């Protein structure tokens, strides 16, 4: 199977390393980062591209753009793993459209295009007879979308709730464990690379909100946008509040919740018993799905990380290969 | 409630039957045989949950069974919900915040723990609300939410409802 990778940051490099490390029968014929690209029908030397990138250089040639890779490279699946833009999904959205119109499958970890334009992209994929898969957009390594769409097919989902943001979970875990203030815990999360320089996207619940929108629109047949999510972040939480919860064997976690029948999408800090399965430590994610046939299921795993997110992308790639791709 | 009945086989069942007949739910039956053994009657305490407005019908049915009701305790507030509030709680009149819930008559604040770390920084409070019904609890939480919005307080609700 031949793939083209757009984005050579944490996720893109995780995919390259997994391809190099394992015999996955995947050839990379196109590769682009934000400023350069390579097209090679015979297969790109990933080792060399990784070392160029590790040395701070561009991954390829400065006169090859991501758009060139989308339009001209010879691939079966476009792997779109550039950073999320929540405002208009670009430039990823345009690249995904371009690949689908060329009759190429698309696998993405990019939340923007899926949250903003899923119905259009789904129809475009169907028209062109190709797959569009996006497991890596929600909860990193946890195969939540696959589980809900395939494993739980036929179930009615009455409620879904969980910890969707590892950065917030880390901050709250540290505040509860050691009585740190929000500011101290955030500074520590930054030092460890768990939080961005501008943490707004995580700590104001935007990231968790987008994940809810993706699940609502792609799995639960709802039509929602980020504006429909009732959203409260964790920036105002105090160590005293965590201690008051602790006195009752509870703690506080940022919980994303969907109640499909009531049309509720909500991200807010909630009091939760410490014995509850959703109370996970550190940067882990955890999601409980309430269903009519299967009962309640809780998924716990790594919600971010280079190789972990690559795992979800590779799962999607092999899903497509096993069902569709010819001539690989 | 505390009941007094004849100490004969079948009497306890006869006393309990009317409870389910009016849609009640028995939470506990406490039956202390040894106390006034000399009498021919039996004292039984029953803790139960009744739909609103069914108490008089239950008393009527019990009387028909020959069971006399010795004592009925005050209606208990069965539903409990604990929330945490963060913000300038004192400066925004905490007793008014509590009053707004107590004023409903069917829900009330039964416990409040307040931590005020420093004069200018926000304080945190754990507040326990009790109510007679689940619906009243939802109403009380809605009131608290709207008060919080007016007073710029952060309300942290439990993951599970009341």
Image: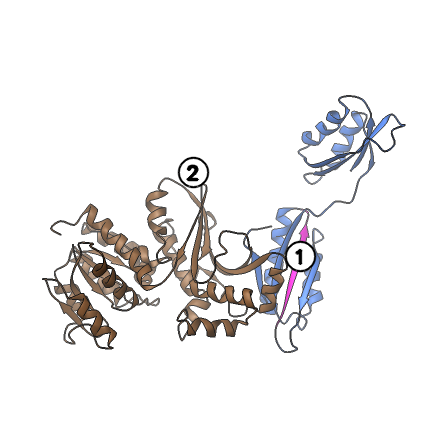
Chain colours: A brown, B blue
Q: Which residue is mark 2?
A: A293
Q: Residue at x 16, y 50 (%)?
A: A325
Chain to which the residue tagged by mark 1 belongs: B
Q: Nearer the viewer, residue A195 or B159?
A: A195
Proximity of marks 2 and 1: CB atoms separated by less than 8 Å: no
Q: Which residue is mark 1?
A: B128
Is A243 left or right of A138, judged from the image as shown?
Answer: right
Residue located at (55% from left, 72% from top):
A181
Q: Is residue A164 visible?
A: no
Task: Provide the secondary structure element on which disc 1 rests.
Answer: strand
Q: Is residue A169 visible?
A: yes
Label 2 Cα neighbours within 10 Å, binned few <14 / some 14-19 / many ≥20: few
Does residue A275 appear left or right of residue A97 in this picture?
A: right
* Disc number for residue A299: none
| Highlighted magenta segment, given as a residue range | B122-132
**Horizontal and vertical percent position of residue A122:** 26, 53
Which residue sits furthest left? Answer: A42
In the rendered image, residue B2, in percent from the top left (x then y), is placed at 80, 36
Residue name at image x 85 percent, y 33 percent: B35
């Amino acid at each position: 199977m031949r793939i083209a990778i757009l984005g050579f940051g944490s996720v893109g490099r995780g995919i390259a390393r997994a391809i190099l490390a394992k015999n996955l029968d995947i050839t990379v014929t196109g590769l682009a980062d934000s400023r350069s690209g390579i097209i090679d029908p015979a297969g790109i030397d990933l080792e060399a591209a990784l070392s160029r990138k590790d040395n701070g250089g561009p991954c390829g040639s400065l006169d090859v753009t991501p758009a060139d890779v989308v339009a001209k490279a010879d691939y079966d699946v476009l792997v779109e793993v550039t950073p999320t833009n929540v405002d208009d999904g670009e430039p990823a959205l345009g690249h995904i459209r371009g690949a689908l119109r060329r009759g190429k499958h698309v696998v993405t970890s990019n939340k923007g295009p899926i949250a903003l334009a899923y119905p259009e992209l789904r129809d475009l994929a169907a028209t062109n007879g190709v797959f569009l898969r996006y497991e890596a957009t929600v909860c990193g390594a946890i195969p939540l979308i696959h589980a809900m769409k395939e494993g739980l097919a036929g179930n009615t989902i009455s409620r879904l709730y969980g910890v969707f943001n590892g950065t917030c979970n880390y901050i709250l875990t540290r505040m509860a464990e050691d009585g740190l203030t929000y500011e101290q815990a955030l500074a520590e999360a930054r030092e460890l690379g768990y939080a961005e320089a501008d943490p707004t996207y995580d700590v104001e619940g935007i990231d968790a909100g987008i994940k809810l929108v993706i699940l609502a629109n792609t799995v639960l047949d709802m039509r929602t946008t980020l504006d429909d999510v009732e959203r409260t972040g964790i920036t105002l939480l105090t160590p005293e509040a965590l201690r008051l919860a602790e006195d009752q064997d509870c703690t506080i976690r940022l919980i994303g919740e969907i109640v499909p029948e009531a049309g509720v999408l909500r991200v807010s800090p909630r009091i939760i018993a410490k014995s509850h399965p959703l109370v996970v430590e550190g940067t882990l994610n955890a999601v409980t799905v309430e269903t009519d046939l299967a009962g309640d299921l809780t998924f716990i795993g790594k919600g971010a990380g280079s190789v972990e997110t690559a795992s979800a992308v590779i799962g999607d790639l092999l899903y497509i290969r096993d069902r569709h791709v010819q001539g690989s | 409630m505390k009941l007094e009945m004849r100490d004969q086989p079948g009497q306890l069942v006869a006393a309990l039957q009317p409870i389910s007949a009016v849609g009640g739910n028995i939470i506990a039956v406490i039956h202390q045989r040894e106390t006034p053994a000399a009498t021919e009657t039996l004292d039984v305490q029953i803790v139960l949950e009744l739909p609103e407005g069914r108490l008089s019908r239950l008393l009527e049915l019990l009387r028909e069974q020959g069971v006399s009701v010795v004592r009925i305790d005050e209606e208990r507030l069965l539903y409990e919900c604990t929330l945490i509030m963060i913000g300038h709680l004192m400066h925004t009149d905490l007793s008014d915040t509590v009053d707004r819930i107590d004023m409903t008559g069917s829900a009330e604040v039964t416990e409040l723990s307040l931590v005020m770390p420093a004069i200018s920084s926000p304080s945190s409070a754990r507040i326990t609300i009790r109510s007679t019904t689940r619906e009243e609890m939802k109403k009380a939480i809605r009131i608290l939410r709207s008060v919080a919005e007016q007073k710029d307080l952060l309300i942290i609700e439990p993951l599970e409802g009341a």
